[in-house]
Amino acid sequence: MPSLSVAGARTRAAALSVQSYDVDLDLTQGERTFGSTSVIRFTASEPHSWVDVKPDELLSVTLNGEPVDVAGLNDGRLELTGLQAENELVVVATMAYTHDGEGIHRAVDAADGLVYTYAMSFLDAAPRIFGCFDQPDLKAPYRVKVTAPTEWLVLGNGAATQVSPGRWELAETQPLSTYFVTIVAGPYHQLTDEHDGIPLSVVARQSLKEALDREAADIFRVTKQSFDEYHRMFGYRYPFGEYHQAFVPEFNAGAMENPGCVTFRDPMVFRSTATDQERGSRANTIVHEMAHQWFGDTVTMKWWNDLWLNESFAEYMAHRVSTVATDYKDNWVDFSYVRKWWGLQADQRSSTHPVAADPVKDAISSLDDFDGISYAKGAAVLKQLNSYLGDDIFLAGVNAHIRANEFGNATFADLLAKWTEAGAVDIEAWAQNWLRTPGLDTISAVRTPDGIKLRRTAPAAYPASRPHKLTVGGYDADGAATIVDVVLDGDEVDVPLDPATLVVVPDAGDDTWAKIRLDADSLANLTAVLPKITDGVTRAVVLNSVRDSAADAELDPRLAFDILLGMLATETTDVGVSTMADWARTHLLGGYLPYEENRARLEKVLADRLPQVPAGTSLQLAVVRAYARFSADTAVLNGWLAGTGVPEGVTMDADLRWLVTVQLARLGAIGDAEIDAELERDSSSEGKVHATRCRAALPLAEAKERAWAIIMTDADVPNYELDAASEGFWHPTQAELTAPYLERFFAEIPGTEKLRSGWIVAATAGLAFPRFAVDERVVARAADLIADESVAAGIRRSVGDRTDDLKRALAVRAAYQI
């Protein structure tokens, strides 16, 4: 179906104004479909328009009491003619439940057979739930009614009341965009609380009851702390009544900011032991979605090109508020290792784009730019803007923007105007260089006889003059720091640091957005000095530089690996261990470097570290997980499953057992029978997903064919199982076994667009890509697919991004003759 264009949206918004929606959903019709009736009241200044609806069957449509021919439905649009100044449109349809995380997703919990549903209306999905005018700038209040099985709980954007057994009515909402409308319905376990007059609740599946009961106190505490800080910063109270946080099954994104009823992926309700970093990440996600209640929900973009602003703002605010208001003080460390690295990779691919794009793309193409640039780069740039403007001007502009556009729509230009009114100078030029120009500068330190020079180099393809306000750190043999504040507003500035300083780190506080390069002397001293640098953010900056320099073939990957091994032997943060071990898994081993000999070195470092880390700590868990991913010692791994030789302080809970099991499967040390036994031990939906990953990882022809069928032909497989089959399929040690699937990937992946829709289509193309096939022939075959415009844009984008990674691996191997 052709997606809505910006021109079409502007035309419809100019002609229509929506007064209200009444939506009635019947979730008692069976396993495949549900009933949907929407009554839309709207005014019109033109006689023609269209309504969006994507039904299983369109039963009837009436406009101002007159029937509309439902046979006119074409690609999700039904033309409307004879519109009057005041109109009432009634759309009655049968809609299909989905398994791809969009529309109304229906999941069956393998643990107990209970059925759970939730609505995800984001970006083209709302018409899969109810007839509507699906674009962000046609906001309206909603009144929603739901018929559900009598034992179910129903939540939504407005306060829900059960008016009779199985019949629920939700309070009228503030004006919402269609993509915010949600319901959460099923036999969910609910816990309630209250803060500052705001009713709160958390819900999850019954099989997660024990875990939710255990985790709720932390979730509520973060929520309450964040409400207080947001109210303080914005001087504007949360406007959407109740605040529910629903942890739902098989959710694609991390979370969705539906006003009054935020949905999260339910692995965030930790059923097994979690690291401090995982808890901090959950807190950050909670705070991120709360930021949207003001910026995104109260004030919404007019078109999808400004979606970056919603996400960048929430990303920046989440790390800021988590750090100052919650118990999780290391969120900027996590940002550097995880989120920023995600964005740095995205900004160097052929698919890079400005943070703030021109409004030329249609709705679904805008989803392609929903990436690390929209989130992490935007957040880093807003952090830099806050430093540039000062907090008073920054917040004054934001607060004025919220008040001026309350419950309406606005553009980035509107926000820039508010910052200017608040006292910002030359912000248009700043925005042009930072936000409307893609790419990133390279910042390097150069030693001279008199001191240090800091140099800025703009990318040749995207020249711009970006000022950087940052710090430069000089570190001695003990890791003691000399920190210098610098404004890098030219191509070169002097930094008053001793040129004999052992390690010089540009942007030591991770305050800007750039590629950071260490000089040769700093790299030579790094292994000795890095473990003694106590600031976690600075260590992350250094290691991001190592990762990025290796990817650019500017640093020998063998030296990068040596630095990594030295870091893993001493690193004191769980996020540092987990992130850098994961980089070895995804990029170094089997990518830049031969797999087995280097895996063995990594296994030894981790094995040596195991008895050294304090028992029962988050750091210990991170080291144990990393060891399990890289160990080839089947005796040790099988012993852990049997309860022997387990490090003191480690609990072999369900998720850690599965991590060990998938490694044993990949090594060929177990087969289907052992996976079946583990699944019998953990018969939950989570267990089923883990088992799918294990089966896909088995080094057996029949296992690979079975997994391939799930990826390429199964239209009904739940999205988490689809992800797991894709994740388990490829591995550097199984290149010969999986070689026949290289050509099959390019031949068959285009067809998956007919099986699934939305987010999962592009995601599967990325996960199932033969990422360890570092071969020019794969690059050439990918180029053919990318050039084929008959292939879905999301698939071509994902294949293009993965191909860029392969090209880098090829360049690294060529440069260092590996």
Image (spheres, rainbow, N blue to C red):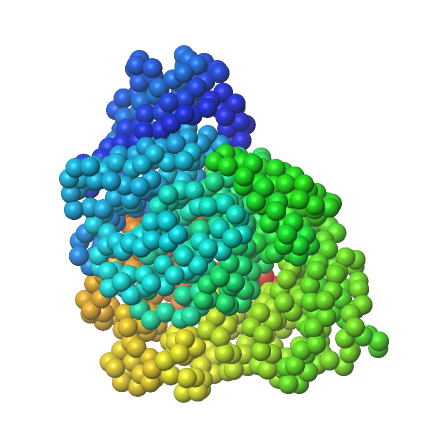
Splitting the image into 4 quarters, where does residue 148 fall?
Answer: top left
Left/right placement of residue 503 relative to residue 297 reads right
Question: Looking at the picture, how far across and down is residue 605, in whole percent?
Answer: 47, 83
Residue displayed at 43% across by 19% down: 43
Quarter of the picture containing the N terminus is top left
Left/right placement of residue 31 relative to residue 61 reads left
Residue 158 vertical placement versus 647 (above, below): above
Residue placed most toward the observer, 186 or 735: 186
Residue displayed at 64% across by 52% down: 392
Splitting the image into 4 quarters, where does residue 111 fall?
Answer: bottom left
Residue 739 vertical placement versus 646 (above, below): above
Q: Can residue 791 be seen in this view?
A: no
Residue placed most toward the observer, 579 or 378: 378
Left/right placement of residue 116 relative to residue 530 reads left
Residue displayed at 72% across by 70% down: 484
Residue placed most toward the observer, 68 or 118: 118
Q: How many labels does the image show?
A: 0
Question: Looking at the picture, how far across and down is residue 601, in whole percent?
Answer: 48, 82
Quarter of the picture containing the C terminus is bottom right
Residue placed most toward the observer, 738 or 556: 556
Question: Looking at the picture, how far across and down is residue 604, in whole percent?
Answer: 45, 84
Question: Looking at the picture, how far across and down is residue 452, in whole percent?
Answer: 78, 72
Residue displayed at 81% across by 75% down: 451
Splitting the image into 4 quarters, where does residue 267 fall?
Answer: bottom left
